[in-house]
Image (cartoon, rainbow, N blue to C red):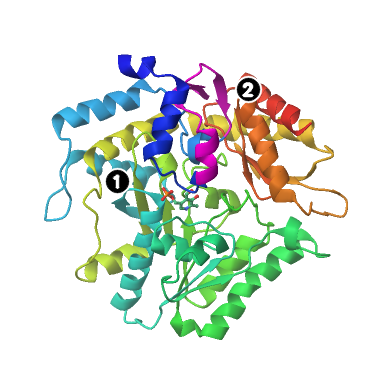
Amino acid sequence: SQTRAARATREWQQLDAAHHIHPFSDMGSLNKVGSRVITKAEGVYLWDSDGNKIIDGMAGLWCVNVGYGRKDLAEAAYQQILELPYYNTFFKTTHPPVIELSQLLAEVTPAGFEHFFYCNSGSEGNDTVLRVVHQYWASVGKPGKKYVISRKNGYHGSTIAGASLGGMGYMHEQMPSQVSHIVHINQPYWFGEGGDMTPEQFGLQRAQELEAKILELGAENVAAFIGEPFQGAGGVIFPPSTYWPEIQRICRKYDVLLCADEVIGGFGRTGEWFAHQHFGFEPDTMTLAKGLTSGYVPMGAVAINRRIADALIDGGDFNHGLTYSGHPVAAAVAVANIRVLREGGVIDQVKHATGPYFQDTLRQALDGHPLIGEIAGAGLVAGMQLTEDAKTRKRFANGGDIGLQCRDHCFRNNLIMRATGDRMLLSPPLVISKAEIDELVGKAKLCLD
Ligand code: PLP
C-alpha cells in the first residue's frame, strides 16, 4: 500500500489506459481523459486519488445496500477464508455457510420460497432462471413450453442469455447469435409512450400485450414471462398500478411462469424486502444479486418457489452449476449482510423513515423544476425525467446528451448520479442518513440548475 499511496493520479490513469478494458465504455475516448481513480470508501462516501470526497448517489452499481466500510462483513469474510476458503457444492458435498444462508433467505423471502440456487452475478442468475424454467416444464411433461417473454428496455445482464432476455437494442446489435425462443413485448413506460391514455389505461394495455403474445405463440409453447418489478437500468421506470396485477392474471390464466428479476429491487431498495412486494404480485422465481452481499463479494442466487422446487427435486439431474455456486466466503458475507439489513433495522428504516424522507425531499426540491417532467420512485430509488415541456410531456430531441452532460457535471461536483438516456437516476446506500439525503438532493438540484 506504500507503493499505492506514492502513485500519482496521472500514473494510475496511464497504467489503466495501457492495460485495462472497462465494461460498457468507449475506451478510445476514456483513455484520452483518464478514469477517475477511486481509492477508498466509508458509509455513503467515496474518495478519489486526489483526495476528493464524493457522495455516492448510486450505491456503486445499485449494490452497496449496507454502505461502505462495514467491519462485520469484512470479519465474516476473513474468518471464513481462514476456516474454509473454498469448497464446492457439486458432488454430494455442502458446507455450513451455504446452509445458513439458505435458511436465512427462506426466512426473509415471502412464503413459498424455500429453495435457492447460487451463482456469482445477476446475469448468471438469469441464465439459471432459463435453465430452471426449461427443466420445470420438461419434468411436468410439457416440454413444448419453451418461449420466454421479456420486455424492450428491460435489463437482465450481460451474458449471452442475460443480454438476450434484456431488451437493450445496442446489446442485441453487438453480436448475431442470441439465445432462441426469447421474444420481447413493449415496456410500461407511461411518460414516454403513454400518449393520451391515463397511466392506468396504459398499464393495462401494455400488460395485455403479454396476452396477445401468448395467444400468438400458443400458450402450450410459452414457458415464462420475466421482468424487473421496476426497470432499473432502463431508467427507474415505475409501471402504472394496473400493470403487475394484470400481468399476474394473464400468467395464471395461461399457466406461464412469472419470474421477477429482483437484482436491483431486492434487499430493501423500495422499503420492502423485495420490490414485487411493493407492487403486490407473487412471482414463481426471483433473481437475486447485488444487495445479497451488498457488493462486498460477488454472489447471485435464484429463489425458486415450492411448485417449481418440488418438480426440480423429483425431476432427475439438473445439469447446471458453476465452480463457485454457493461459494463459502460469499455465503458468509451474505449471511452477515442480511443480518445487518434485518437485525440492524436497515430495511425498516428505509420503509418508515429515510425512504419517505428521500421521496419528499426530492419532490420538494425538484417538482416544477424546468428540466424535470416526472419523478418516479419509492424507498431509496428514483428516476427523474428530463423534459422540455412537463405539461405536454415533450422530451428533448437531444435528451441523451443532456443526461450525459448532467451526469458529468454532477461527477465533477463530487456527486455520483447516473443518467440513462434522458432520465437521471438516484439509488444511494440504504444506510444514508437524513442529513446525507439533504446533501445528496441539494447537490443534485444544484447540478440540474
Ligand atoms: N438484472 C438486473 C435487473 C440488473 O440491473 C442487472 C445489473 O445491473 C443484472 C440483472 C445483471 O447483474 P450482474 O451485472 O451482476 O451480472
Kind of residue at disc 1: Ser
Whole-number angstrom distance, CA of label 1 to CA of label 2: 33 Å
Name the side, left or right, on which 79 lies relative to 39: left
Q: Secondary structure at mark 2?
A: helix
Q: Residue 33 bears which disc, if any?
A: none
Q: What residue do we see at 33% from left, 31% from top?
A: 336
Q: How would you rate the neighbour count of disc 2 (Cα within 10 Å): few for under 14, some for 14-19, many for 20 or more? A: some
Q: How many marks?
A: 2
Q: Residue 102 bears which disc, if any?
A: 1
Q: Position of residue 145 (x, y in %)?
A: 41, 79
Q: Position of residue 314 (x, y in %)?
A: 23, 69
Query: Is 37 contained in the magenta span?
Result: yes
Q: Position of residue 59 (x, y in %)?
A: 51, 34
Q: Residue 434 bears which disc, if any?
A: 2
Residue 86 sits above or below residue 76 on the image: below
Q: Position of residue 128 (x, y in %)?
A: 34, 60
Q: Give the position of the C terminus as an image quadrant.
A: top right
Name the side, left or right, on which 148 lies relative to 399: left
Of 96 and 72, nearer the camera is: 72
Q: What residue do we see at 33% from left, 53% from top?
A: 114
